[in-house]
Image (cartoon, helix red, strand yellow):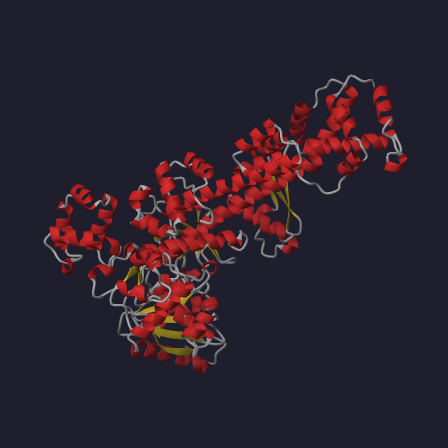
Amino acid sequence: MTETILEPKALKQAQQELTFKPAAVTAVLTMLDEGNTVPFIARYRKERTGNLDEVQIRTIETTFERFMALNKRKDEVLRSITEQGKLTPALQQALEQAAKLQQVEDLYLPYKQKRKSKATVARAHGLAPLAEQVRQQPNFSREQWEKTAAQYCDAEQELPDVAAVWAGVHEILADEFGDVATSREWTRQYTQRQGALTAQVKDEDADEKGVYRLYYDFSQPLAKLAPHQVLAINRAEKEGILKVALVVDTSVIVAHLTRQTDSRRNQFASELVQAAVADAYKRFIGPAIERELRAKQKELADAQAINVFGENLRHLLLQPPLKGKVVLGFDPAYRTGCKLAVVDGTGKFLDKLVIYPHKPASQKLREQAPQQFLDFLEKYQVTMIAIGNGTASRESEQFVAETIKQSSRTIYYVIVNEAGASVYSASDNARAEFPELHVEERSAVSIARRLQDPLSELLKIDPRSVGVGQYQHDVSQKALSEQLDIVVENVVNNVGVDLNTASVDLLQHISGLSATISANIVAYRNENGRFANRKQLQKVPRLGPKTYQQAVGFLRIIAGTEPLDNTDIHPESYPIAAQILQELHLTKADLGSEQLQTFSRLLDLDRLSANNQVGRSTLRDIISGLCKPGRDLRDNVPAPLLRQDVMSIEDLQMGMELQGTVRNVVDFGAFVDIGVKHDGFVHISQLADHFVKNPSAEVAVGDIVKVKILNIDLERERIGLTMRGLSRD
């Protein structure tokens, strides 16, 4: 919050617009202004907010900031018009009642300082009075009008004849009509309701793969345009493939604007007014409204794409960790060989190896690869292999599947989305962590860790690089980054982190912790050994009382001196937690026990709440923390789909039922990995037996789903899937 919440007007406006209780809105804004973070407020101040979650709290914040910006702009416009001496009571009232920034800008348009134009030149030549006379339409004869216009002729002012005078009057009238706020607003709404976006192919050769063929002859009402259509058309237009236009019945608009402007009291003047209105629409209103509406469509499409990306990222980050497993990361390649890296159950790098199982490697190297691979697996007792899904992925999967059959132990493999792994591997952080490894070898470590603990590893790269969105490079990168940062912050703080193992990359997403303080925590840990309790955090340089309050509840200490430190109970609530245990005749040694879970149901929450001045919501959270120490909400997410064998697209048959992993969810369906070279696609119409409006309501990234082969296109290597008629068990 950059503004103080004491601005009463914006506060009242936000309270009136939002459906939350006014007291909750005030409380949220007050706490944000005091430096509290959204995760902290949502988790530890539920009584003050009325149990609002992170999304609702951010909605309050953005709504308030929007009204602050609106009011600031109103003040600027009122001041500017007042300084011009043109502010009327009616205009002031209209500005004060404007609920949207666009309405303010429409009202201000006639008073803006304009660049030199034909209209400004005409005014400079003194034609404004004649233009106003035409607007009033006195009952002059044509001869009287011509005689009046002749009085303005002046060769020195580029008005040599009556025709030049009327041309100047036309420019003034068209300029004035184009600035009428009510005309723009009506045109905006009519075009939004009745307009259509059309696209025609402009350069088919530029669309080598026919990606945009669907839009070569396209028309869709604005009101029915899907966000992904907007983004696709915009991209194709930018690449010169399509010619795009916003089409609307201009005759209806011009007729309406004329009725609002033309009094029809005088035929000659009426003709001038009508011509000026038509020109005003053609040159000023129409193009401006088209730009506005297309920009609005882009804004809405961006928001939807960003929401889709954010939701996919959230599910990707919440994929369950494979705790305690020795994992081998397999980074596939052809010519340069496949890079292997083994990490232990804590993610510590153990060893690396390069094998050459694919052409163009020599036959000798290819023959050696299986045994080298098996020996490496046996040396470290690997039970889980993570294969990156990049170049040579499916060939490597075939190699792995065939080779592990020769092992006496049960070994599984998983295809891991390696998007962004190369970005991380070449980063300063990766070089600092593994200075002795090559980029590809670091990538293999990253792939292994992505399977072992997706959250910790994925946070090391720019969220935009994880490959779970649609058109993410076409949307506002600032808005995308802001939304993804929010998603990461919410996930990390909901999961919590182990204070003694968390990296700087992970810690800096914890409530209240900056990159500098996170680095100081790790440095303190390296110098003094593991943290024994949460209180030790207060010894970390630059970590003051406010930061400690905001962060400490989201940091866990396993097997420390204080058992409550391995819960999401805030230290400020430790006395109440101790009292609850005492009432149940239990100790901290009983945390998580069945006895505690059973007895806690008998507690009198009303009495505890009254005696300790603590809300029931906080009490429930404390009891939950006592019953489930060390809980990880990712434990409830289905584990990755483990495989031991592989198929090719040629093995597939129509109607075949398979299990697959959802890799990406978009507005028009979902991509599913079914264990062949290319992901299959489930169109939105095939996601369920009922009508589906939003694919994200049916599936999420990481879901294990049953699918049936609907169609197979071997030439284009495309697989159509359906989930209709299949159980979701």
Residue 29 vs residue 402, the one in the foreground: 29
Q: Residue furthest left?
A: 585
Image position, residue 463 (x, y; %): 45, 59
Q: Identify which residue, 58 or 494, lies in the foreground.
A: 58
Give 442 or 366, whichever is nearer the viewer: 442
Task: Left or right? Give the position of 371 relative to 478.
Answer: left
Residue 266 rendering spot, x and y as whole percentages: 76, 18
Tell me the quarter of the picture where residue 347 sits.
bottom left
Foreground residue, 697 or 611?
611
Q: How many marks?
A: 0
Residue at left offset 67%, top offset 26%: 255
528 shown above or below 186? below
Relative side of 575 to 428, left or right: left
* Left or right of 590, for residue 426: right
Q: Is residue 255 left or right of residue 129?
A: left
Position of residue 527 measured from the top left corner of the image (x, y, whole percent): 33, 74
Establish if 230 lies above or below 404: above
